[in-house]
Image (spheres, rainbow, N blue to C red):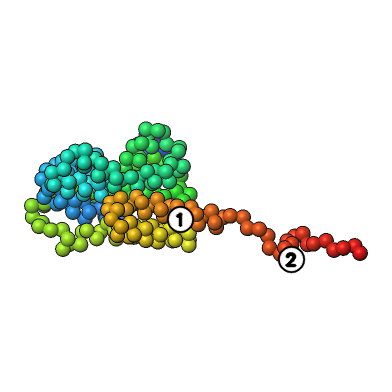
Amino acid sequence: MPSRSRIHSPLHLSARAEILTGMRMGLPILIGYVPLGIAYGVLAVKNGVPAMWAVAMSVLVFAGAGQFIAAGMIGAGASIPAIFLGNLMVNLRHVLMSAALTPYAQPLPPAARALYAAGVTDELFAVQMADFRAGAPCSSWRLFACNLTAQSGWVAGTALGGISGSLVADVKPYGLDFALPAMFLALLLPLCGDRLQLATALSAALFSLLFTMAGAGRGSIILAAAAAATVGLFLSRRKNAPRPPSGRGGHTAASPPEEDSA
């Protein structure tokens, strides 16, 4: 008789497979988050945030751009309401990401959906959206394993940056500030599978540049995202719009004009 420890139910095996798949999905993001977390940890410590609280923020908040902004505003002596409003403006783009993910996350219970949404970042959104489009099921094991794997890299980087913050004078010579846009580009390219998606991505880049030059500041991100989504919707409807049948003399090939009996 086989030992009880070797008996695995199909549900147990399925959960293990989904967890491993989620970890594989989050591993490249983990690698990219470590240098970004180091940069944030260094910045936080230099702006008067204790390393312990910087790590706690990475665990509880997990918002890269928002955490960078918060650290800078804390160093400048900003008030808590000002920090809150600044993060709200920067993270408004998550409303659009949540709207895109909602149809796929419907099988999750409400509490699980809320917890899942709290851990979604730009990079995780790109990876999981591509996974959903490829036909992947909505598995809580898969989604949470992916999110937690990526977040562990961010937390570990924050801890390293917080500990070594007093030893690093400036992170720019190490190229850590370029890690985030490089990761965005690497995650964006696989999603541009056709001309419509490529046109939407290029229009987002163009709108972001125009809004930034116009002085929109941090708000250029959400404005460019909304404008590019509008362009994508317009192009999609134009592409899928039914076209009138063509034929000679204004008649269709399927129903040729009737000839006079005379």
Residue 39's place in the image compared with 52, above or below, is below
Q: 134 or 92, which is in the foreground?
A: 92
- Residue at 14%, 52% (x, y): give it: 42
Q: Which label number is shown at residue 249?
A: 2
Amino acid under disc 2 = Gly
| Callout 1 amino acid | Val
Mark 1: secondary structure: helix
Q: Which residue of the protein is positioned furthest toward the front in this rendering? A: 214
The residue shown at (21%, 59%) is: 176
Based on the displayed image, in which of its 4 quarters is residue 3 positioned? top left
76 vs 1, nearest the viewer: 76
Q: Position of residue 152 (x, y in %)?
A: 25, 46
- Pinpoint residue 49: horizontal percent, then vertical percent: 13, 44
Label 1 crowd (10 A; few <14 / some 14-19 / many >=20): some
Name the residue carrying label 1: 231
Q: Quadrant of the C terminus?
A: bottom right
Q: Position of residue 37 (x, y in %)?
A: 21, 51
Q: Horizontally, is 32 left or right of 14 in the view?
A: left
Distance CA(mark 1)–CA(mark 2): 35 Å
